[in-house]
Image (spheres, rainbow, N blue to C red):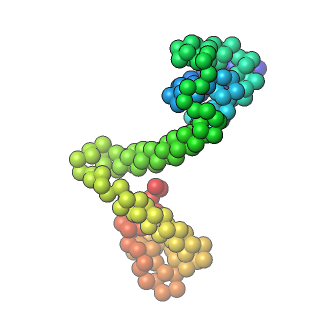
Amino acid sequence: MKVKKDNLKEFRDKRVEINVMLVQKTIDKIVALNGELSANNVSKTSYLIADSVLGEKGISASAISKNIIYKQMIQKAQQEMGSNEGPKGFKTDGDIRIELFSIKIEMEKIKKENKLLREVLKKYGGNLNSFDMSSYEEIEKNQLIQQASKGLIQRLYELGLAEYDMKKEALVLVQLGDILLHRNGYKLIMEDS
């Protein structure tokens, strides 16, 4: 029972930490957009900018209103930006949503670039001198070709038309014995990307 209680406490503590970071990120975003800081706006915006990879899910307005920590964070930010006068920049929720949508698109592009850069760093051992950043599109094309080739090979396996011959160290056609792909090419395509 003690282990179960410890796990539950650990889960709750982690959830509180994630939510506090989400509320702060949301407040920062609203302040940057000169939006109105209220529990309702923080709630709506938190759902729009929540990152599921980080475990964020968005926070309801009632949860914000009931939690003294969240309320204090909002009040502190209101005092810092003089939010008592009302919104300074955006007049409607639609304006904020449009801006947040463009930010989400930008975030997705950045995530994609970060993933690619991590792969490049892993592949080249952190030595970017040997990598030309202008070949970003070429790498994407190569990844698409690799994925398509992998799919074709897997389909050939499923249909029983191809198999990996350990003696020849190659992918061969079952009926004819013709080599489709030598070992190095096979490893290159079938490695996890």
Quarter of the figure that contains the N terminus: top right
Residue 32, relative to residue 81: is it above or below? below
- State whether residue 65 appears in this view: yes
Would residue 58 be visible to someone looking at this image?
A: no
Q: Position of residue 73 (x, y in %)?
A: 60, 16
Query: Looking at the image, which residue sits at the far left?
Result: 129
Q: Is residue 160 above or below residue 47?
A: below
Q: How many numbered markers are drawn?
A: 0
Residue 93 lies, in percent from the top left, at 65, 36
Among the 4 quarters of the image, the one containing residue 48: top right
- Residue 107 drawn at (x, y percent): 49, 42
Q: Up-down: is 183 above or below 77?
A: below
Query: Is 115 situated left or right of 22 in this image?
Result: left
Q: Identify the image quadrant of residue 99.
A: top right
Q: What residue is rendered at 31% in x and 45% in y?
A: 125
Residue 21 relative to residue 59: left or right: left
**Residue lying furthest bottom:** 176
Tell me which corner region of the image, top left, top right, bottom left or bottom right, holds residue 186.
Answer: bottom left
Residue 28 pos. (x, y %): 53, 25
Residue drawn at (43%, 83%), measured in percent from left and top? 178
In the rendered structure, the answer to whether residue 178 lies left or right of residue 73 reads left
What residue is at 76 percent from the left and 24 percent from the top?
62
The structure residue drawn at horizontal position 53% and vertical position 14%, both measured from the top left corner, is 80
Q: Nearer the viewer, residue 29 or 93?
A: 93
